[in-house]
């Protein structure tokens, strides 16, 4: 009896994936729950396991093809038998396999049919922005399908030429000696698209401040051993200080924790804190849910777990969505100053940086203190300059005097 392996549910707002790598080849024996194929989504890489034991008899979606949730990936046969599966629905953009009577004929497109149908994410964006289907009759996706990037390119064009046909893809340049061309991963393309979308959509502005880390460093040095012992190996880092400091500031300034939804502003009475971490395939932002209700230990435990699983590529899709505010720490890579880009649809992001000893004026005297620059990028459409500056000042006050966090000041 044949067993069909289909694309599983991929999580909130994720409807398509790219077949990144087959871990088995046709004819290989497969055990139940053994990984068959890796799917690359907009956010993470997902392994699809065999639901039963058998032999991989047919691969329907080859590497590089784009597949939708529920699409057929492969067929498992019993033992070593190959199971014909002529009725299998191919992955989007993949030609059906030939049958015993020859290749499957494709009916000619009628006058009302669309040959290059947009991908689901692109179709949603076209509908949200009132882009007619005729304006993007073909795209840069597989088999000419319109991608989200094509829609973004269309929306970025001058208004004077809204009906112009999409420009033909630029021919790849010739490689010189010592050069190598590597296809962008789906995750990297998604990062590029979303960062550009954030720049094109939001009225983005960045404000800066600096914080004296002396008190936080002294508190951590005094209690880190007792903290780790009490909380069974959970280490006390600086990120929990900044999460708690941001939570307090977000409660005072709710616009920084809000987002624009059409003509409305959505305010929240909870904080789902996104923490940017370096993953196996690039930067990802797992979300610490209800960070406003967590202790220092709860925050450190969640962040430590995310960091380990990000390096191993084991984060779940649902852990990467739903954030209301993001913290990114370029200081771990040595960055002294940067202007972080918004993690849309969020309205603000805090950038932490390297702690560096610098001379500053303290009580009329020059002292050497461990200082960190902070940067808050924000959407000026929803957050006023006064709110942004006040937010950073509150974070600075809470870090320079951590007792404020304990007293809820």
Image: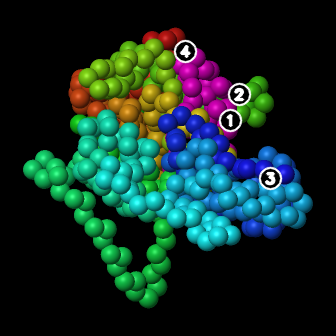
Instruction: Give the residue displayed 71% in from the left and 50% down from the top.
Output: 5
- Residue matched to label 3: 2
Name the front one of labels 3 and 2.
Answer: 3
Q: Which residue is mark 1?
A: 235
| Span shown in magenta | 283-309
Q: Are marks 2 and 1 in contact (CB under 8 Å)?
A: yes
| C-alpha gap between disc 3 and disc 4 | 61 Å
Residue 11 part of the magenta segment: no
> Which residue position holds label 2?
227
Query: Does dot 1 land on a helix, a strand or a loop?
Result: loop
N-term mark: 3 or 2: 3
Numbered mark located on residue 406 in the image: 4
Sooner in the amino-acid sequence: mark 1 or mark 3: 3
Q: Nearer the viewer, residue 246 or 132?
A: 132
Q: Find the distance from the CA under tag 2 to the CA under tag 4.
A: 16 Å
Q: Residue at x 45, y 14 (%)?
A: 269
Under circle 2, the secondary element is helix
At horizontal 58% and vertical 69% (from top left) the residue drawn is: 103
Task: Tell me which numbered mark, 2 or 4, is placed earlier along the sequence.
Answer: 2
């Amino acid at each position: 009896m044949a067993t069909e392996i289909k694309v599983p549910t991929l999580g909130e707002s994720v409807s398509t994936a790219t077949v990144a790598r087959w871990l088995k080849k046709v004819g290989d024996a497969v055990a139940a729950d053994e990984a068959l194929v890796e799917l690359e989504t907009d956010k993470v890489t997902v392994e699809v396991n065999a639901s039963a034991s058998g032999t991989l008899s047919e691969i329907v979606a080859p590497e590089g093809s784009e597949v939708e949730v529920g699409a057929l990936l492969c067929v498992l046969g019993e033992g070593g038998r190959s199971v014909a599966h002529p009725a299998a629905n191919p992955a989007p953009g993949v030609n059906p396999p030939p049958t015993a009577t020859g290749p499957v004929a494709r009916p000619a497109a009628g006058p009302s049919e669309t040959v290059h149908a947009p991908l689901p994410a692109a179709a949603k964006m076209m509908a949200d922005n009132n882009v007619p289907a005729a304006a993007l009759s073909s795209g840069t996706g597989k088999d000419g399908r319109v991608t989200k990037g094509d829609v973004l390119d269309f929306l970025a064009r001058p208004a004077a030429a809204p009906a112009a046909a999409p420009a033909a893809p630029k021919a790849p340049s010739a490689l010189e000696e010592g050069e190598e061309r590597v296809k962008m991963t789906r995750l990297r393309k998604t990062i590029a698209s979303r960062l550009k979308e954030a720049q094109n959509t939001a009225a983005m502005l960045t404000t800066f401040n600096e914080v004296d880390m002396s008190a936080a460093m002294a508190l951590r040095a005094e209690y880190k051993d007792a903290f780790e012992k009490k909380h069974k190996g959970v280490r006390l880092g600086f990120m929990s200080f900044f999460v708690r400091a941001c939570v307090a500031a977000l409660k005072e300034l709710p616009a920084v924790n809000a987002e624009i939804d059409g003509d409305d502003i959505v305010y929240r009475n909870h904080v789902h804190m996104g923490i940017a971490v370096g993953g196996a395939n690039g930067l990802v932002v797992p979300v610490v849910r209800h960070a406003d209700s967590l202790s220092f230990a709860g925050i450190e435990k969640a962040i430590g777990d995310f960091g380990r699983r990000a390096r191993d590529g084991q984060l779940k899709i649902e852990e990467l969505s739903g954030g209301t505010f993001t913290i990114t720490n370029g200081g771990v890579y040595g960055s002294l100053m940067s202007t972080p880009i918004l993690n849309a649809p969020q309205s603000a992001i805090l950038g932490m940086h390297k702690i560096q000893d610098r001379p500053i004026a303290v009580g009329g005297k020059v002292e050497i203190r461990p200082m960190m620059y902070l940067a808050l990028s924000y959407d000026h459409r929803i957050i006023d300059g006064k709110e942004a500056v006040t937010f950073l000042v509150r974070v600075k006050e809470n870090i320079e005097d951590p007792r404020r966090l304990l007293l809820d000041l």
